[in-house]
Amino acid sequence: MDAALDGLEVFGGLGCSDWAYTGQQAVAVSPEPSAWVVEGLVEGLRLEDFELEAADATSPGGSSIAMLVRASQNILLRRVRLVAGNGAAGAAGQDGQDGASGEAAGAKKDAGDDAGDKPVDATVLPKPSAAEQASSTDTKETSADKPESPPTDDKGASTGDRDSKSEGGQTDA
């Protein structure tokens, strides 16, 4: 719609048989993705009791617009419903560039560094060196560490020091 139709008034919501006001919106479906383009109006546009529907966009990345108003004045929309269709999917992108080549499987980063190239068997531990064995703290008791056991009779009862103490804990003096 351009300046040639400046000042236009369009009313929906009227019954077709008697032109009585029904309040029901007239539906206008556009075959284009931009249903109404209003541009360059000075006197304006009055639109009442309509539903304007735009078609779905068809060009890649395109939009569906129910009404576009540019450089216009005095635009009155009363009881108007604007319905845009679906936008179109964007164009397919281009393939990316190949990445840099990586190292071949099993290749070493440094010829002198073969750490990590050999599998590790977690069940086999290295033997400690002689110095490590000598400096380790051993908790085993030796016969020199044990106190001497008291003498026993042939039944295993202790016989030690019975002469110096009586059975009541008193000494015989």
Image: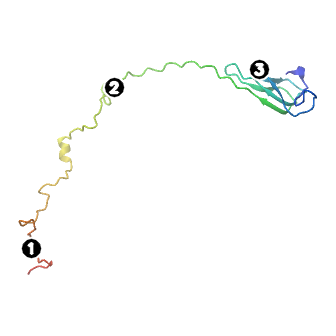
Q: Position of residue 139 (x, y in %)?
A: 20, 53
Q: Secondary structure at mark 1?
A: loop
Residue type at mark 2? Asp
Mark number displayed over residue 85: none
Q: Residues within 10 Å of mark 2 (few under 14, many from 20)?
A: few
Circle 2 or circle 1, nearest the eye? 1
Q: Which residue is mark 3?
A: 32
> Quarter-wise, where is residue 95 in the image?
top right
N-terminal of the two: label 3 or label 2?
3
**Is tag 2's residue or tag 1's residue first in the polypeptide sequence?**
2
Among the 4 quarters of the image, the one containing residue 150: bottom left
Q: What's the distance in space between the residues labelled 3 and 1, CA to CA?
A: 122 Å
What type is the residue that disc 3 sits on?
A: Glu
Check whether the beta carbons of the residues at disc 3 and disc 1 lie within 8 A of each other: no
Judging by the rendered image, the residue that carries numbered circle 1 is: 162
Quadrant (top left/top right/bottom left/bottom right) for the C terminus = bottom left
User: Real-space Cα distance between discs 2 and 1?
Assistant: 79 Å
Judge by depth and name the residue closer to the eye, 11 or 135.
Answer: 11
Mark 3 crowdedness (10 Å alpha carbons): few <14, some 14-19, many ≥20: some
